[in-house]
Image: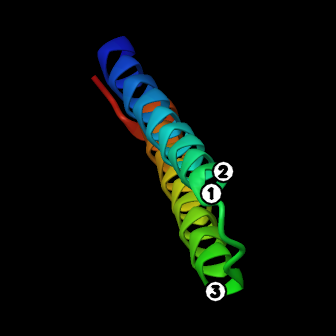
Amino acid sequence: MTESLIVILLVFVGIMFGVLAFCLRERKRALANKAVDARRDEQADNRVAMVLFGGILVGALLALITAYVVFFRTY
């Protein structure tokens, strides 16, 4: 059981790292853009929101998998 939980933890950490890296990259791109372009800013915000909500959904799925491994899986 501990191997399964370690894998789930590593997947979770990887997803959070990916989300953080993407958000920081988008922030860096937004700061590098000197011109004020509302459309580009809105598109960047939408990309960040989609990645964040995707990370939340995957985290919820991982919580369900963890509950299955802990409570219902027999060895």
* x, y percent for residue 55: 54, 54
| Relative height, residue 39 to residue 49 (above, below) | below
Q: In screen coordinates, is 35 left or right of 11?
A: right
On residue 39, which mark appears? 3
Quarter of the figure that contains the C terminus: top left
* x, y percent for residue 32: 59, 50
* x, y percent for residue 34: 65, 60
On residue 30, which mark appears? 1
Q: In screen coordinates, is 60 left or right of 62?
A: right
Question: Residue reaching furthest top?
Answer: 2
Q: Which amino acid does label 1 sit on?
A: Ala
* x, y percent for residue 42: 67, 80
Label 2–label 1 contact, CB within 8 A: yes
Seen at 56% across and 39% down, the residue is 20
Seen at 45% across and 25% down, the residue is 9
Disc 1 crowd, CA 10 A, few/some/many (<14, 14-19, 20+): some
Q: Which amino acid does label 3 sit on?
A: Arg
Label 3–label 1 contact, CB within 8 A: no
On residue 31, which mark appears? 2
Marks 2/1: CA–CA distance: 4 Å
Q: Which of marks 3 and 1 is nearer the N terminus?
A: 1
Disc 3 crowd, CA 10 A, few/some/many (<14, 14-19, 20+): few
